[in-house]
Amino acid sequence: MAKSSPLSYLLVAVGGGVIGFLAAQAITPGVPPDSAPASQTEGESSQSERLAGLERVALGERLQGEITSESELNGNDGSRFERYVMALEEDDLVEVTLDGALQGVVSLYDDQLQLVSSGEIMRQRIDQSGDYMLVVSGADAQSYGPFSLESRSVELSDSDTLTLASPLDSWLQQDEREYSFTIDEAGMYDIDMRSDEFDTFLVLEGPSGYYREDDDSAGNLNARIADFLAPGEYQLTARSAYGDGEGVFTLALDSRELPSDTELRNSGELTADAPINGWYSGEALTYELTLDETSDVTLEMRSSDFDTFLEVEGNGVALSDDDGAGGTDSRIGEQLLPGTYTVTARGYNLSASGLFELTARTEPSEVEPEL
């Protein structure tokens, strides 16, 4: 831990709020805030004594508490907080999760009251063994309630080989990590990269010039490549979306089993009221819809794997939609004349991939469309 002179007043920015308290008074009641130590050695001793006065919790121990009107007051914004001390070891990757009814954050300070990290889920690699202070704070002056703290030492993997159905946790530090894996049997697979700390990004390369990349297909800035993979050797690059993120991430390779009655169709005729399933892997798929009479037509494309995009062309009509069905699903509703139309199903992001369902619904229209 970096040694510095004691702070008489500590301000910590957390989200949109600020945790502020008189460190000297808050940790050791009765000590005047302007009482400076006679020497640096005495100052360091004073800080240790202050931490020693807090309730001690062990890494891995579940802690339950509550923020009430009796909790210590943050004079800056009126929020309340509770403090604890925890012994941590050098090079440990520590995760502390705040849960419960309380809307708030947990912050970690070293024994010189310097902020190390904060958040609802806080992860931090420890630079030096010693005692650290945990502060649980309400988000604002109206935040009260019970809370629980879960803490653990995260075990990281140094392996550069990804194995089916064996997720691994690793650490990214403003760089990229490279992995390899082997597909023995052709089929559909999901590769997920998830992190609470940065925007993840995946690049996959494989046999016969195969190339896919993805940023946010797993939602919440998490990356997913879902695709049909042929047997062979694959190389996977895991990084942050903008090359400047760091923190813990989880990487997983899993096979996907389709329901036994699911048949994939990536082209052909689209029949009214007969949904079809297709597999998108970066190249637009086209289908034909034929109308024998003027009809009100509704086309829908839905997927839990990627952001869909739908187009229809023919008889002077050219329509498209991204999110008309809600979420990231697509819908086109239009009155169309008799004839044959080309329906194109693709992803909004051309590098996305995954399973989708395409449906056409038609009803005869009694009113001729305006030309």
Image (cartoon, grey):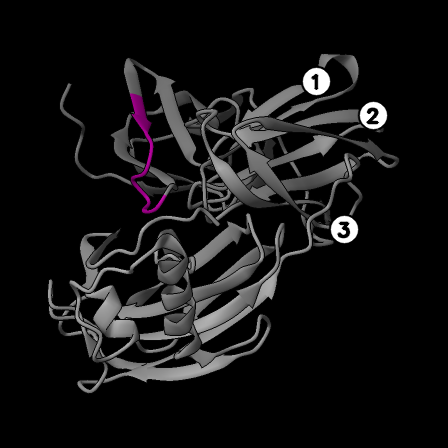
Which kind of residue does numbered mark 2 sit on? Glu
User: Does label 2 or label 3 sit earlier along the sequence?
Assistant: 3
Q: Is residue 215 above or below residue 305?
A: above
Tell me the CA gap for discs 2 and 1. Answer: 11 Å
Please give the residue where the numbered disc 2 appears in the rendered image: 233
**Residue that protrudes farthest toward the right in the picture:** 184
Magenta part, dominant SS: loop
Q: Is residue 97 above or below residue 39?
A: below
Q: Is residue 120 visible?
A: no
Q: Residues within 10 Å of mark 1 (few under 14, many from 20)?
A: few
Tell me the CA gap for discs 2 and 3. Answer: 17 Å
Q: Which residue corresponds to the image point at 39% horizontal and 42% vertical from the top-left? A: 329
In the image, the segment drawn in magenta is 319-327
Q: Are marks 2 and 1 in contact (CB under 8 Å)?
A: no
User: Does label 2 or label 1 sit earlier along the sequence?
Assistant: 1
Please give the residue where the numbered disc 1 appears in the rendered image: 210
Mark 3, mark 1: which one is toward the viewer?
3
Is 78 placed left or right of 358 in the picture? left
Q: Which residue corresponds to the image point at 43% horizontal and 67% vertical from the top-left? A: 48
Please give the residue where the numbered disc 3 appears in the rendered image: 166
**In what quadrant of the picture does the C terminus appear?**
top left
Question: Dot 1: what SS?
Answer: loop
